[in-house]
Image (spheres, coloured by chain):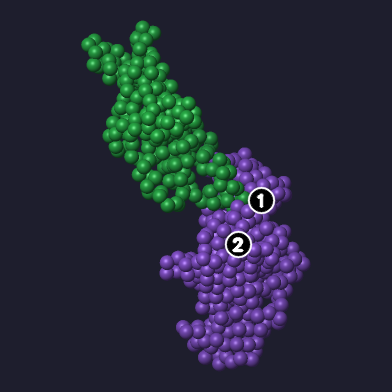
Chain colours: A purple, B green
Amino acid sequence: MLQVRILKSFGDFTLDAAFDAPAGITAIFGPSGSGKTSVIRAVAGLLACETANVVLSGTSLDRTAPNKRKIGYVFQDARLFPNMNVLKNLRYGGTHDEDAVIAVLGLSDLLDRFPASLSGGEKQRVSLGRALMSAPEMLLLDEPLSALDGPRKAEVLPYLEVLRDQTDIPILYVSHDMSEVARLARHIVVLDQGKVVLAGPLEDILADPAAVPFLGAQDTGSVLTGRVVGHSDDGLTKIETGAGPLWVPGPLGRSGGYLRVRIPSQDVILSRSAPVGMSALNVLSVTITALERGGQAGVIVTLKAGNDRLLARITKRSCDALNLVEGMQVFAILKATAIAPDDVV
Amino acid sequence: MTDWLGPNEWTALLLSLKVAFWATVFSLPVGFVVAYALARGQFFGRGALNVLVHLPLVMPPVVTGYLLLLGFGRTGPLGAVFEDLFGLIFAFRWTGAALAAAIMGFPLMVRAMRLSIEAVDAGLEEAATTLGASRLRILRTITVPLAWPGILAGAVLGFAKGMGEFGATVTFVSNIPGQTQTLALSIDTLLEIPGGEPLALRLAIVSIAIAAVALILSEMLAQRVTNRRTG
C-alpha cells in the first residue's frame, strides 16, 4: 500500500493531491497539464514540494533521499545511458532477478547493443527491465507508451500485463490514454488542474455518471470482466460477463480464461423493444437505474445489466422520444465492432 | 636536427612543455569541479564565481601577472603559505610560470568543460538517482563519460594556452633563460637581438606544430568516444 499526499505550488498552478494506491497498477489519469507527472516525480523525491508525504507499507519516505527510495522509475523517454550497452544499463541499479527479467522482457538478443541502435519499443523494454532489476518496492511508470506508435505499443503492452500479474508492489501508471488504462489498471486516480477529482477501483469510477464531466463520454463506460466460453468459426469470441454474454471480434484468450471488456458509454444504444433485423450482435436486457441530464445535449443513463453496471450516453432528444424513466426495462445494444480490439484484454 | 634549434631554444621548448603539462594537470581537477558547480549547482555566489573564473580572460595579462606577484611572490601572503607548507616557491621559478599558465588557461578550460557538462541530459542523472546511484557514482559513470570530449577539449585548450602564455608569465616570473624563459618568451627575446629572427621563426613553427598536433589528437580521441557510443 502506498499513501501519497502532495502539495506544491508552481506560480498560479497548485498541485494538491492525496490518494492511496494498493498493490497492483493504479492509473494516474488526466489531461495534459493536470499535474500527473509532477505527482510521481514528487513520489520519487525528484520534485521539491512544500509537502510530499509518501508512506510505503507503513514506512514514511519523507526523509529518504531519492536514491535510497527503492523505486523503479520508467520515464516517458526511456533515459537509457548512451555510454553503456544494454546489459550495463540493466545492471546499473542492481542484478535482482536478472535472468528472469531478461527472459520475460525478451532482452537476451539486445544485451550487447547500445541504446542508440534500439527501437523505441526496445528502449522502453530495457528501461522497464532496468527498473525491475533494481529490486524496487514500488514502480513509477510515466507514460511509458506515449512516445511509441501503434505497433510498438502493442509490442510493450503485453510485458506490462505480465509485470502487473507477477508483482505485488504498488505501481503508479501515468497515462492520458484510457484504452491503456482500462487494459492495465485496477485502480484509477483522476487529476484535473492539480486536484484529485475521482479515485477508486477502475470499474466503479468509469461506470460512475459523475465521472463523465472529467473523463468525457468517450472514456467513461463499463469495464466488465468475463470468462471466455467459446470461439466461433467466423472469428468471434464469446465472453460470459456479469451483464450477460458478449461477442467480441477476434480469437481472444483461452477458453475458461478471464478477459476484460470495455464498453464506452457513447457506444451503447438503447431500445424499448427487442431489436430485430439489426447487425448488432450484442443485445442485453437491462434496467434503467438513473438518468442524469448533463449541461449539454447529453443524458447519462445508468443501467443495471445482470450483476454489472453499464453507462449509456444518449441525446436529450432520444431520451424524451423514448420516454425513458428510472426503473424501466430496456434493451442495450452494443455493436461488437464498438468494442475496439485493443480494448479487449 | 639538433642544430636546427640552438641549445637555449631546446631548453625553452622543453620548459614550455613542462610548464604547460603541469599547469594542465593541476588545473584540470579544479577546473572540473568549478565547471560542474557552474553547470549543475544552485548556490549563493554562483554569479560571482562565474565572473571570477572569467576575469583572467578579459583582464590585461600584465594585471594578472602583477596580482600573482603580489599574492604569490616570496613576500606575498599566499606565496609564504605555499613555501611554509609545501616548500613550493613560485617567484622567478618555472613553477611560477606554470601557475601563471594555469590561471590564464583556466577560463578557457572551465568554459569548454562547463558547456559539455551542460550538454549532458540532466534527465539521465535523474534516472541514475532513481536507480539508487549516489552523486559521486553518477558523476563517475554518467556525467564524466558523457562530457568526456568537452573535458578533453578543455584540457587541450588549457595546455595550448599554457604553451603560449606571455604577459602574465613575464610579469610574474620574468624572463630567465633556463628557468622561466618559455617558448613565447624565447621568441620575444630572439626578436630583440640582431640576427635572431630566423631562429624565432623556427620556434614559431614549432609552437604552431605543437598546437596543431594537440588539436588533432583531441579531435581523434573525442571521435573515438562518439564512435563507441553510437556504434
Q: How many labels does the image show?
A: 2
User: Which residue occupies the foreground of this view, A36 or B98?
Assistant: B98
Same-subunit check for callouts 2 and 1: yes
In the picture shown, does residue B178 fall above or below A305? above
Residue A99 spot, x, y in % from top left: 72, 46
Q: In which quarter of the image is residue B215?
A: top left
View extreme (right): residue: A256
Label 1 crowd bin: few (<14), some (14–19), many (20+), radius 10 Å: many
**Residue position marked by numbered label 2 in the rendering:** A62
In the picture shown, does residue B66 fall above or below B116? above
Residue B33 spot, x, y in % from top left: 47, 41
* Numbered tag placed on residue B69 in the rendering: none
Residue pictured at 40% horizontal, 19% vertical: B15
Q: Distance between the residues labelled 2 and 1?
A: 21 Å
**Residue position marked by numbered label 1 in the rendering:** A134
In the picture shown, does residue B115 fall above or below A219? above
Residue pictured at 52% horizontal, 56% vertical: A147
View extreme (top): residue: B3
Which SS class for mark 1? loop
Residue pictured at 54% horizontal, 57% vertical: A46
